[in-house]
Amino acid sequence: MKDTYRINIRRLLLLFRNCFIVDKGLLIAAAVFTSFLILSRILNAFSNDAHFSYETLFFLFLYISGFLMTIGVNIELHDKRKPHAWLLLPASTLEKFITLLFLTTLFLSVGLAVYMTVASHIIDFGVALFFHTEINGFNPFSITILKQIGVYVAIQAPFLAGAIYFKKHAGSYTFLILFIWGAMFWIFSFLLGMFFLGDYITPVLPGFGVMDGVVELRDIDTSYAMTLLEKLKYAMDFWKPLATIYYWVLSPILWWAIAFFSLKEMEQ
């Protein structure tokens, strides 16, 4: 039990190093991304230096890389053609989980941001020498970038859990579970809202009426609807921070807990 939750910094660093050495795909991915950046920036320079968005490419690279790394985790853990050497490494379950979490979230997002910053400035400098364009490199500290990294971490959490738990088709099963969970959540929220606020909400919902034997769509009382929305604004002000805490904090922690105990069960 103690070995499961024990953390040794030296052993954890060795585990990180082992993952970096084994994963040769990082160099291939960096070469492909760099080539794509150079080609895109040159083509943009030919179009009279129209606005070039490094932020869009960053989001594209981040989600593609995260998806590929998640597939790699699933293959490394469940591929029957491999002897499960990674699970047999002399490290605790918590150390192995921290390694997987670090590689697919913090290392990927921060490492890609550093890479984009350096590569964009070098590429922009080279393009400026030949095409006399302005140097507008990637800014990793913009609010948009930091917010999108947080969104990626929140989205990546259930897919990491799926990659560890499911043996095959982890991405498809994870999508299906998230879809079912989302549908159940919204149906439950709607039914709960109608139960407590049905008498207030029903008048603003479109309905059908019969006039002179003809079925017509009833008009909505606009003034009543605006009054209701104004009253519900206070409820939304209370609900919004709770939803934010759930999305950014509670939900990722829940999925990470599922991922950790799934990994622990695999080692038993």
Image (cartoon, rainbow, N blue to C red):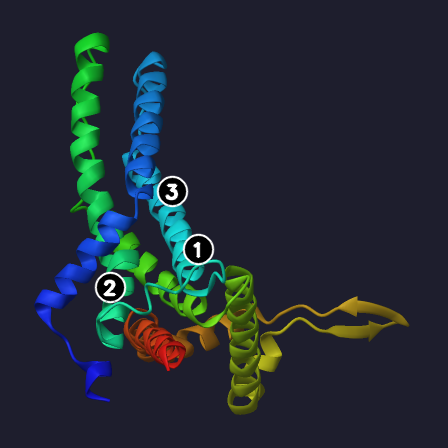
What's the CA distance linking mark 3 and mark 2?
Answer: 24 Å
| For residue 245, above or below residue 103 | below
Residue occupied by mark 3: 60
**147 up-or-down from 161: above or below:** above
For mark 3, give the secondary structure.
helix
Nearest to N terminus: mark 3 or mark 2: 3
Q: In screen coordinates, is 156 left or right of 19?
A: right
Distance Cα–Cα, label 1 vs label 2: 16 Å
Which x, y percent locates residue 141?
16, 47
The furthest residue to the left = 10
Please say whether residue 94 is visible from this viewpoint: yes
> Disc 3 or 1, which lies upstream in sequence?
3
* Farthest residue, direction front: 83
Q: Amino acid at mark 2?
A: Thr
Quarter of the image where one finds residue 238: bottom left
SS at circle 2: helix
Q: Which residue is mark 1?
A: 71
Figure check: 53 above or below 212: above
- Mark 2, residue position: 99
- How far apart marks 3 and 1 lie (CA) works out to 17 Å
Q: Amino acid at mark 3?
A: Leu
Circle 2 crowding by C-alpha within 10 Å: few under 14, some 14–19, many from 20: some
Percent x, y of residue 81: 49, 58
- In front of the other: label 3 or label 2? 2
Image point 20% across, 50% down: which residue? Answer: 110
Write down the quadrant of residue 34 in the picture. Answer: top left
